[in-house]
Amino acid sequence: MKKIIFLSVLTLLAGGLTFGQGVKTQTKNNYKYGNAVDVAYEVSFPMGNLMNGATTSWTGFTARYEFNMGKGWVGTVTSGYLSFADKNQQSYSVVPVMVGAKLHVLAGWYGMVETGFNFFSTSGPTAYSNPAEWGYSVGTGYEIPLSKLLSIDVSTKYQYNLDNLSYWNTRAGLMFKF
């Protein structure tokens, strides 16, 4: 699995060298890749060791700040709160703090990579709080422009963490551009 993720990241970066050259900072169709704040609702599906104690997360909210890095590249800083449904009277919550980049390869479509820390905590019979779990994610998404200053951002990503407390994440957000 690690080789597949590594190859996906490598392919994304190699694609950026070819496709990213032609992407402009702003296009005629209200696509503007620059500074923005994105507030989103998330649904996460546990994978790996997280499946042992958690089921699907129907409660998740994140905020993302985006800044233009030029030629289709956008830097990101993301944080929020995810709560996984309990299994065996145990519930998990995660606070991700991630930094990353998006590469817009076509108008609206982008690939993304992020790295950072996930702060896990549980409640129930074997409650614990993990100070920080380093991880990375690889994903893709699409921005739907509603106006020059407002877009809908829909994305999906795989989040891998060191102790294999991993999850698949889908996200729908409202992006305010400035």
Image (cartoon, rainbow, N blue to C red):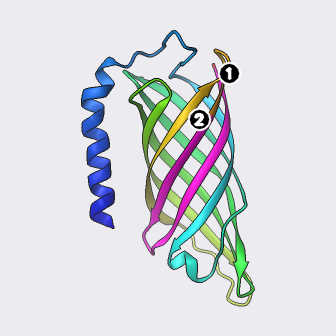
Q: Residue at x 33, y 58 (%)?
A: 5
Q: Is residue 126 above or below residue 171?
A: below
The answer to the question of whether label 1 and label 2 lie on touching residues, with beta carbons closer than 8 A, is: no
Q: Residue at x 30, y 27 (%)?
A: 19
Question: 36 or 129: nearer the eye?
Answer: 36
Residue at coordinates 43% horizontally, 56% vertically from top-left?
Answer: 136
Give the residues drawn in magenta, as a range: 153-177
Q: Is residue 46 above or below residue 158?
A: below
In the rendered view, does 37 fall on the left or right side of 136?
right
Looking at the image, is 110 positioned above or below residue 127? above
Q: Amino acid at mark 2?
A: Tyr
Please indicate whether residue 11 sits to the left or right of residue 92 in the image: left
**Marking on residue 146:** 1
Q: Quadrant of the C terminus?
A: top right
Q: Residue under label 2, please give it.
A: 65
For marks 1 and 2 on the same chain, the one whose residue lies earlier in the sequence = 2
Task: Please name whichever residue, 88 or 74, is drawn nearer the observer in this view of the structure.
Answer: 88
Tell me the element at label 2.
strand
Query: Residue 138 appears at what percent x and percent y?
Result: 42, 51
Q: How many marks?
A: 2
Residue 35 location, quadrant: top right
Identify the residue at horizontal 75%, vertical 86% (top origin). 89
Q: Does 160 lie within the magenta span?
A: yes
User: Split into 4 quadrants, where in the image is the N terminus?
Assistant: bottom left
**Which SS does the magenta portion mostly show?**
strand
Three-letter amino acid code at disc 1? Leu
